[in-house]
Amino acid sequence: MSSDIPLSKKLLVPMTKPQTKPNVEICISIQSHLWDDVNLGIIGDCVEHSLQTALKEVNKTPESVEEISIVLANDEFIQELNHTYRGKDAPTNVLSFPQTEPEEFEYLEFIDSLGDIILSYETIMKESTEQNKTFEKHLKHLLVHGVLHVLHFDHENEEDAQKMESLEIQILKQMGIKNPYEII
C-alpha cells in the first residue's frame, strides 16, 4: 500500500512465546502525530492476543504467519483509502486489507504477510466518547475486528456476521473487555 503521505515512524513488535524466537512481526507505522501519546505496547499486545486466538479458529498457528502491519492514521488518510477502495467518501474507524485471497488462504501453509490494518485516531476518539468507552478499550475492539478481517472473517451476511461477532466477543472477554455489541 502506498501513499503520498510519508509514514513518520515505523516500529516492529515481535510476537513471542516465552523463551522462543519471534513468530509474527507486528509492524506498526505511525502516519499521524495524533498517536504520539498512545502506548504502542498496548497495540502490540492486543494484536498478538487477537492473532493467537483467531488463528486457532482458522486452523493456523502463529508460526505460519510472518507479519501483520498496523498503520496508525488520521481521518484524512483513512478517508482517502475508504474512498479509493470502498467508494465511500468519509472517514471510518478501521480498514483492513488482507494480502491473500479467501480461496487461497485456507490452503496456504505459510503466509508472508496477513495484511494491513489502518486505524483513524480521530474517528476512534469520537466514537469512544459517543459510546462512553475508554479510547483504549475501543481501540482494542477495533484491532480485534481488523485482525479478524485480515483472516477473512467478515460480516457481509447474517451467518458470517454472527460468527465474526461471537469471536470478537470471545477474544475481548479474554482481554477483560465487555461485549461491545451489548445494548445498555
Image (cartoon, grey):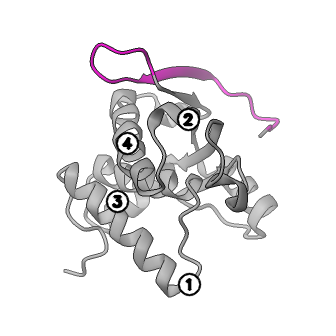
Is label 3 or label 1 in front? 1
Q: Could you give the CA–CA distance between mark 2 and mark 1, rounded to whole angstroms?
A: 27 Å
> Which residue sits at x=41%, y=52%?
54
Marks 1/4 in contact by CB < 8 Å: the verdict is no
Q: Could you give the CA–CA distance between mark 3 and mark 4, rounded to whole angstroms?
A: 26 Å
Disc 1 packing (10 Å; few <14; some 14–19; many ≥20): few
Q: Is residue 145 left or right of residue 175?
A: right
Magenta segment range?
A: 2-22
Secondary structure beneath dot 2 equals strand
Q: On residue 157, which mark appears?
A: 1
Q: Could you give the CA–CA distance between mark 1 and mark 4, rounded to whole angstroms?
A: 25 Å
Q: Earlier in the sequence, mark 3 or mark 1?
A: 3
> Which residue sits at x=75%, y=54%?
80
Marks 2/3 in contact by CB < 8 Å: the verdict is no
Residue receiving disc 4: 52
Foreground pick, 23 / 116: 23
